[in-house]
Amino acid sequence: MLKIKNLHASIEGKEILKGIDLEINPGEVHAIMGPNGSGKSTLSSVIAGREEYEMTDGEIIFENEDLAELDPEERAHKGIFLSFQYPVEIPGVSVTNFMKTAINAHRKANGLDDMPANEMLKLIREKSELLEIDRKFLSRSLNEGFSGGEKKRNEIFQMAMLEPKLSILDETDSGLDIDALRIVSNGVNKLRTENNAVLVITHYQRLLNYIVPDVVHVLIDGKIVKTGGKELAYELEERGYDWIKQEKAV
Ligand SMILES: Nc1ncnc2c1ncn2[C@@H]1O[C@H](COP(=O)(O)OP(=O)(O)OP(=O)(O)O)[C@@H](O)[C@H]1O
């Protein structure tokens, strides 16, 4: 589904990603862990096509299509979803209305008519129940006065509604209390199919107890320096990152 080859990317002339290779197949969950400033968020932003980042070498192929020329919106319409690290507040636009607009924009970009109102209502009901989202929450203004956990839950709700092929969840664990973590993780797990994939970027092994990865990658200084199974996350939690840096230096 996603093939990244020798990806180099810079911001303001400074090279952050220094040759990333990554392949994600349908049905898989991959996790990326790594120390602060190693380039994790840069990687997710570059996949999503944020314009502040300059891809200086390599390629990103999504479903056999080179993403280089596509802007973030076009990538989203192709089925790539990036959870927002800093969600925007839109006073006066309810969660429901925002969701309707987003879904219909996707449909239009893929040559479909607006979703009929009754179908939309059914979908909203179904997905909000799946994520244990309160009805009252749906009529609130988007992100206005939302707690950290409510913002995260809303992101996963967006993901549930849009049914992306590839979901990139960046720092999904920050700001979630234990119950919300469980609900969000259960939601992500329930949304998994053999046709979609998830890339989770996290600092903590804790989240990976709930969203169990097939593959864990360690990103240090703009490069993937180690790849393993879910047990690698436990090892990192216990031992930190220095041993990997030392291993690399040998
Ligand atoms: N907009 C920007 N302007 C300048 N430098 C940036 C910008 N965004 C990121 N960087 C730099 O790029 C490097 C990688 O940042 P990035 O946010 O990708 O790391 P990260 O691994 O996600 O870190 P953290 O774990 O702290 O979230 C850092 O040195 C950071 O200062």
Image: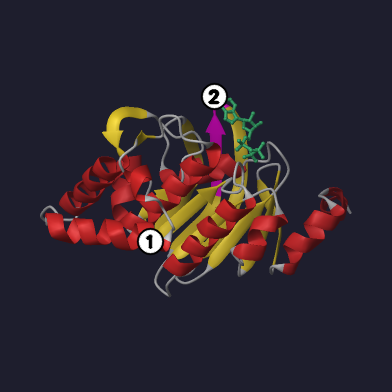
Secondary structure, mark 1, is helix
SS state under label 2: loop
| Foreground pick, 230 / 148 | 148
User: Residue 35: x and y, percent?
Assistant: 73, 43
In the rendered image, residue 104, in percent from the top left (x then y), is placed at 19, 49
Report if the beta carbon of the residue with label 2 is closer than 8 angstroms to ligand 1. Answer: yes
Residue 202 in percent (x, y) is at: 64, 50
Q: Which residues are magenta?
A: 7-13
Is residue 57 among what the camera can see? Answer: no
Which circle marks residue 12 in the picture?
Answer: 2
Q: Mark 1: which amino acid?
A: Glu
Q: Residue 43 is drawn in which quadrant? A: top right
Looking at the picture, tell me which residue is in the foreground, 8 or 123. Answer: 123
Residue 221 sits above or below residue 110 on the image: above
The residue sitting at 41% across, 53% down in the picture is: 133
Q: Is residue 4 left or right of residue 119?
A: right
Q: Which residue is mark 1?
A: 129
In the rendered image, residue 64, in percent from the top left (x then y), is placed at: 36, 63
Q: Quadrant of the C terminus?
A: bottom right
What number is the disc on residue 83? none
